[in-house]
Amino acid sequence: MDVFDRLKQAAASDWAGYVDHEFVVQLGDGTLPQAAFRFYFLQDYLFLIQFARAWGLAAYKSRTIADIRAAQAGLAGILDETERHVRLCQRWGISRRRLETIPEHQATVAYTRFVLDCGAAGDLLDLQVALAPCIIGYAEIGLALSPAGVGALGKHPYREWICEYAGDAYQGVAIAARRQLDELAERSMTGRRFEELASLFAKASRLETDFWQMVLDENGLTLTASETHAPDGVMP
């Protein structure tokens, strides 16, 4: 069992609340309305801007060239992801300028600033543990939403989103993140510190859950998936 699996096990209920959230369920079965997905996607762009800052902080907190290179790769990946967001938003008629003037929701601020605070106050291991629910969690969600492979998704309205996180490239990002957690833990993690990191991981998972819930609350979707309607052609 690697460090990430140990963290998940220690925060099992919080982790389940995140990866099995109703937002994920509705996205997975294609019933999440288009307006709700767009709301999420716009906030996710703002989310990524702050995560780019977190990867910059990771480079500053690094003590080895290998760690700096990992931070560099993480930052490059985030910047590429923001460009994919821009391209999709342009399909919806939302310009880059408009995208960058959308106010951050409180839930977006809460998790991203929590991550930055963990990095500023702690070390690189603290920062990577705070990032892990997002980085590795999205990879697990992507796989969970494509159990028969992305080729079986057909005309699923959120096929593009699922493929992004279930795909080999992003799965490789998650594997690298798990590996770095193990390497950092080997250098500095004691039994007592694991308990502190598990608490940090649990809080980060809850803040991710709040981010999903924000979408449902803001779009009046505190319903079961069967009570919503499937959108048409959300992500062509």
Image (cartoon, rainbow, N blue to C red):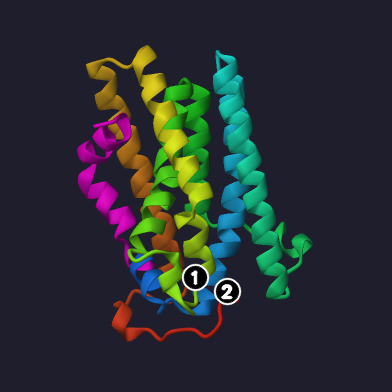
Q: Say which quarter of the image contains residue 59.
A: top right
Q: How many marks?
A: 2
Q: Quadrant of the C terminus?
A: bottom right
User: x, y (%) of residue 24?
Assistant: 37, 65
Task: Tell me residue 92's x, y (percent).
Answer: 68, 75
- The chief SS type of the magenta part is helix
Magenta includes 16?
yes
* Along the line of sight, the residue nearer the viewer: 35 or 152: 152
**Which residue in the structure is indicated by mark 1?**
159
Residue toward you, 67 or 192:
67
Disc sitting over residue 148 in the figure: none
Q: Is residue 102 visible?
A: no
Q: Is residue 103 left or right of residue 127?
A: right
Secondary element under disc 1, as helix, strand or loop, is: helix
Are the two marked residues, 1 and 2, in contact with CB atoms closer than 8 angstroms? yes
Question: Quick check: can you spot residue 6?
Answer: yes
Element type at marker 2?
Answer: loop
Amino acid at circle 2: Met
What residue appears at the point 44 percent right and 65 percent down from the top-left corner? Answer: 150
Q: Earlier in the sequence, mark 1 or mark 2?
A: 1
Q: For residue 68, which quarter of the picture? A: top right
| Three-letter code, disc 1 | Arg
Q: Quadrant of the N terminus?
A: top left
Q: Which residues are magenta?
A: 1-23
Residue 215 in the image: x percent, y percent? 46, 66
Residue 128, percent across and down?
45, 31
Q: Which mark is residue 235?
A: 2
